[in-house]
Amino acid sequence: MNAVVDHYAIGDLASKIAAALQAGGKSLDKIETEDLASVDEFHVRGRAATLELGARMGLAPQTHVLDVGSGLGGPARTLASTYGCKVTGVDLSPEFCEAANTLSSWVGLADRTMFVEGDATALDVAHPTFDAAMTLHACMNIAAKDKVYACVRKALKPGGIFAVYDILQGEGGEVLYPVPWARDAAISHLVTTEKMRALLQGAGFEILSEDDSTEASEAWFKRAAAKLSDSGRPPVNLRQFMGEDGARMTQNQVRNLGDRRIRTVTFICRRL
Ligand SMILES: C[S@@+](CC[C@H](N)C(=O)[O-])C[C@H]1O[C@@H](n2cnc3c(N)ncnc32)[C@H](O)[C@@H]1O
């Protein structure tokens, strides 16, 4: 199995999420996208970060968005339910794509979100079909980021917005593992803010804005670490499925952010 797919493999994910929701008193026929946010928004600062991106993307019901590395589909559903837009997600993990499509059917968004298995470095796009694109916390696993951004440029109509929210290499030293995207350095490919800027510009994007949210991310992870006791846990969260590593990943993120070994940065770009 691909090492990245292997890292994220959980098994029978939709059933596990359903069981956890039901154990928390939620009925599957009455859930909303917000009820899934603790498990399906798999990036630092969760749903709030997705809504921040969405506000910068000029979304409307007729907009078709490409989500690169879409995971369980939380960002796609959040934007589809908020703006009425259509989102197509691509992810390397077949398990995540299958679960993402199932979760969308639970909340009545199967007609506006679709998740397909694919490698972001080799997207099958012959001509520009998307009005906007986004990627949240996926390129940390990808060495050939230039290929990803070249594919996104091909897929996007001229002038289209590309929103990039990623974890970048900070100035505070090497990353402490395990972290949510990697159990060791073999599948972790972080670049600095300067390098990311150059990669995006080199792929044919104009950077309209750049926001470093590291401080807010540190505060968010400190709150998550404080909730590690069972009493404070949300009814369903991905960490509970990630085995013994889950708690250590959270603790390391507090250190990594605090030491500025990592930074969280958002780039809003326009396709030239
Ligand atoms: C930390 S999760 C983020 C998921 C989602 N963007 C979110 O914010 O909820 C990283 C995702 O990137 C995906 N990924 C990693 N490498 C990829 C690649 N080469 N092509 C497509 N997806 C990839 C993983 O399978 C995983 O679902």
Image: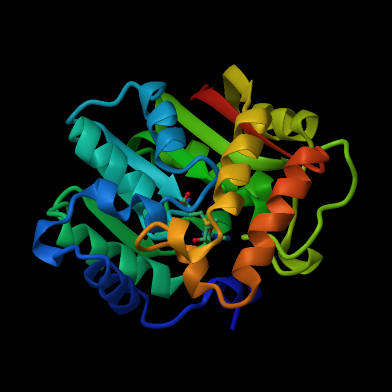
Q: Is residue 4 above or below residue 204?
A: below
Query: Which residue sits furthest right?
Result: 173
What is the x, y in percent for residue 251? Answer: 69, 56
Query: What residue is drawn where x is 62% and y is 65%?
Result: 247
What is the x, y in percent for residue 65? Answer: 33, 39
Q: Is residue 270 above or below residue 83?
A: above
Query: Which residue sits furthest top?
Result: 208
Q: Is residue 4 above or below residue 199?
A: below
Choose between 174 and 142: the one closer to the eye: 174
Query: What residue is drawn where x is 78% and y is 34%?
Result: 195
Instruction: Name the colouring of the figure.
Output: rainbow
Drawn side of residue 223 relative to residue 70, left or right: right
What is the x, y in percent for residue 19? Answer: 27, 76
All told, the count of numbered labels is: 0
Quarter of the image for residue 115 reads bottom left
What is the x, y in percent for residue 107? Answer: 16, 55
Choose between 153 and 260: the one closer to the eye: 260
